[in-house]
Image (cartoon, rainbow, N blue to C red):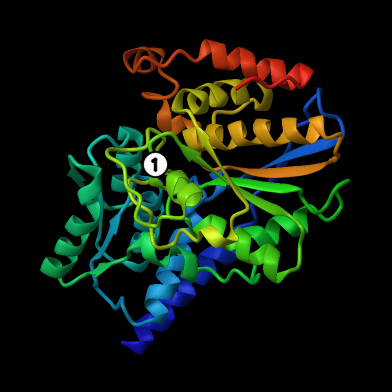
Amino acid sequence: MRTWLMQAIRKIEADFNRSSDTHLIPLPIPAAPDIQLYFKDESTHPTGSLKHRLARSLFLYALSNGWISEGTPVIEASSGSTAVSEAYFARLLGLPFIAVMPASTSQEKIRAIEFYGGRCHLVTDPATIYDESMRLARELNGHYMDQFTYAERATDWRGNNNIADTIFKQMALEPHPEPTWIINGAGTGGTSATFGRYVRYQQKSTQICVVDPENSAFYASFESGNPDCTCEGGSGVEGIGRPRVEPSFIPSVIDRMIRVPNVASYAAIHFLEEVLGRKCGGSTGTNFYGVCVLMEEMLRRGESGSIVTLICDDGNRYLNSYYDANWLAAGGHDIQPWLQRYRQFFNQGIWQA
């Protein structure tokens, strides 16, 4: 048993050793020459998203705690990207993997999970993914990975080449190496917990902003201080926003939250394709909305500085949804007014939301 465990950890570490870090991409904003914007491009991980980091950490955490051994079925509750990444690592270790996910999850993500040998278990009500995952784990004598509980503790937030650590290293030679803001969304809450703890531990002045889709419990909880906030249905932006406040969401290390209309997130990725030349997932659009709000405030105050946000995943996973004109029209999402707002801000620094 110990021999298999040591081999499993070695395989994961070897996989990490084969990978270089993700790029930090600058996007000059003509209307804000004294404020630099950077995108940490997490879409270039082997499984195509930020969740590759989380999946690696969760597997190492579960292995080190003795929760996974040879042949253990691994079950995860996921809206997509985490499941894709966990399926990758399960295949690396020769373990069965089942993703419990809402039936509305994009077909592209389902195909990606199946490509890595995982099985998708779809549920109609997104709120039932937790109980269904626990049920399957009991029945199969498997391990429920539970990203929503363990995301905030599986990653070493003090450094050790985590996402915050790599960003600050990559910013070292930039005009403003210590960002004024780091902006990201919350799915589990683990990434914002890593950022918030890291900047405090490393004694940085950087502030952390979490952007949240319109139908999510995180924003209401942060504003009210009530950890028991809930809402019905999905957030409308895959990978971020939750119907309940997840255990890994740590509001005390977040400086600000911004609620983002879903149509604004969808429009933002179409705009980013114009100026970045690449397709990004919906959560990247949510991030960019937050960038515009905070950068406009800095402009009004006459501040210089830098802002860092994330390209969370590749937009090609959403060709049949966010990038599909028929899908947008069917949902009543008119992105044209928002596209004009983004273009206006980009060129003139005027933000009207």
132 or 206, nearer to the observer: 206
Q: Where is 290 relative to 162, above or below? A: above
- Viewed as shown, does residue 131 lie left or right of 325? left
Q: Position of residue 242 (x, y in %)?
A: 37, 46
Identify residue for label 1.
216
- Viewed as shown, does residue 60 lie left or right of 350? left
The residue located at (32%, 38%) in the rendering is 234
Give the amino acid type for the residue marked by disc 1 in the picture: Ser
Residue at the front extreme of this rendering: 224
289 or 114, nearer to the observer: 289
Is residue 50 in view from this perspective? yes
Is residue 162 in view from this perspective? no
The residue located at (44%, 73%) in the rendering is 60
Q: Position of residue 190 (x, y in %)?
A: 49, 59
Q: Where is 160 relative to 83, above or below? A: below
252 or 329, nearer to the observer: 252
Q: Where is 178 relative to 194, above or below? A: above
Q: Position of residue 262 (x, y in %)?
A: 45, 28
- Viewed as shown, does residue 96 lie left or right of 157? left
On-image quarter of the N terminus: bottom left
The residue located at (28%, 46%) in the rendering is 114
Q: Position of residue 202 (x, y in %)?
A: 73, 69
Q: Secondary structure at mark 1?
A: loop
For disc 1, the neighbor class at 10 Å (few under 14, some 14 to 19, many from 20) is: many
On-image quarter of the C terminus: top right
- Viewed as shown, does residue 242 lie left or right of 259? left
66 or 207, nearer to the observer: 207
